[in-house]
Amino acid sequence: MQKPPPKPTDATEMVANALSLAIHEHRLAPGTKLGEDEIGDVYSVSRTVVRAALQSLAHVQLVEIQRHKGAFVAHPSPREAREVFEARALLEPRTARSAATRATGRDINILRQHVTEEHAAMADGDNGRAVNLSGLFHIEIARIADQETIGRFIETLIARSSLIIALYWRRESALCESHAHHALVQAIADADEQNAEDLMRSHLVDLNSALDLRERPVQTRSLRELLQQPAR
């Protein structure tokens, strides 16, 4: 039975958020060992704080804690990659449909801002940040749909998707197919439920087609070097 996440302290939450961002922005690759001492040195916190942060990330499946070996950035298998995108394809088209019936003007502006920031990241060549922003865009659609239980599932699936993309992405041009998010925002703004649902479904099919489900080597740069890269 999975243990509940520890109650966060400010320091624990700071470290967990920093590690989560580094994972989502692909500065920490799947399979990277997360040494407690090294993380503690980078963020000037105790091993107790680091351990609690790693436990909280393990609870949301971003980190795997292996007995007698330590903590590692989660490393989804090809089978799990397929299952994650199959699950997203089941849930997110209906969520997009619901969002089209509920979105306010403020919601549309938030979605458009996400797209603008995503494109800016791509223009800067920062594909890790672009992928992270893309995931936040999908989470925002789930929020607009006002389906709390499904939204939590989608948030977890998107976190796993970030790891999957870091491992198995083979077609960077797919990241630059900006029309997909633009078209989705427009369909939601137009309250066009069917179009929003269809666009989300085809978008997820396209993302899935951009994966090459073969194993990738783990990078060997030091954890300190990876964590001290500036988050953009």
Image: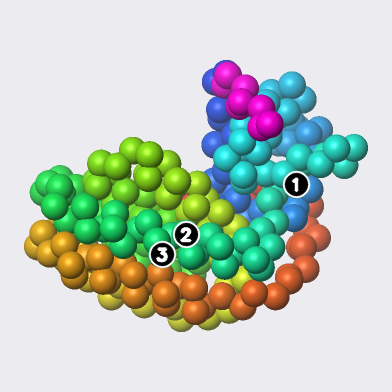
Residue 182 in the figure: left or right of residue 192: right
Disc 2 on helix, strand or loop?
helix
Decide: few, some or many residues near mark 2? Use Cα within 10 Å; few <14, some 14-19, many ≥20.
few
Q: Mark 3 points at which residue?
A: 89
Task: Give the magenta-colored segment's residue range.
Answer: 1-8
The earlier-in-sequence mark between 2 and 1 is 1
Tell me which corner region of the image, top left, top right, bottom left or bottom right, holds residue 31: bottom right
Question: Residue drawn at (21%, 52%), measured in percent from left and top?
Answer: 99
Residue 146 in the figure: left or right of residue 210: left
Q: Name the residue under label 1.
A: 72
Amino acid type at circle 2 is: Ala
Residue 43 falls within the magenta-colored stretch = no
Tell me how many marks there are.
3
Circle 3/circle 1 CB separation < 8 Å: no
Question: Residue drawn at (37%, 45%), measured in percent from left and top?
Answer: 150
Give the Cα distance between marks 3 and 2. Answer: 5 Å
Quadrant the N terminus occupies: top right
Q: Horizontal and vertical percent for residue 40? A: 74, 31
Q: Name the residue under label 2.
A: 87
Question: Residue drawn at (35%, 58%), measured in percent from left and top?
Answer: 92
- Depth check, mark 2 against mark 1: the one in front is 2
Give the Cα distance between marks 3 and 1. Answer: 28 Å
Q: Can residue 228 be seen in this view?
A: no
Give the Cα distance between marks 2 and 1. Answer: 25 Å
Helix, strand or loop for the magenta stretch, by majority: loop
Circle 3/circle 2 CB separation < 8 Å: yes
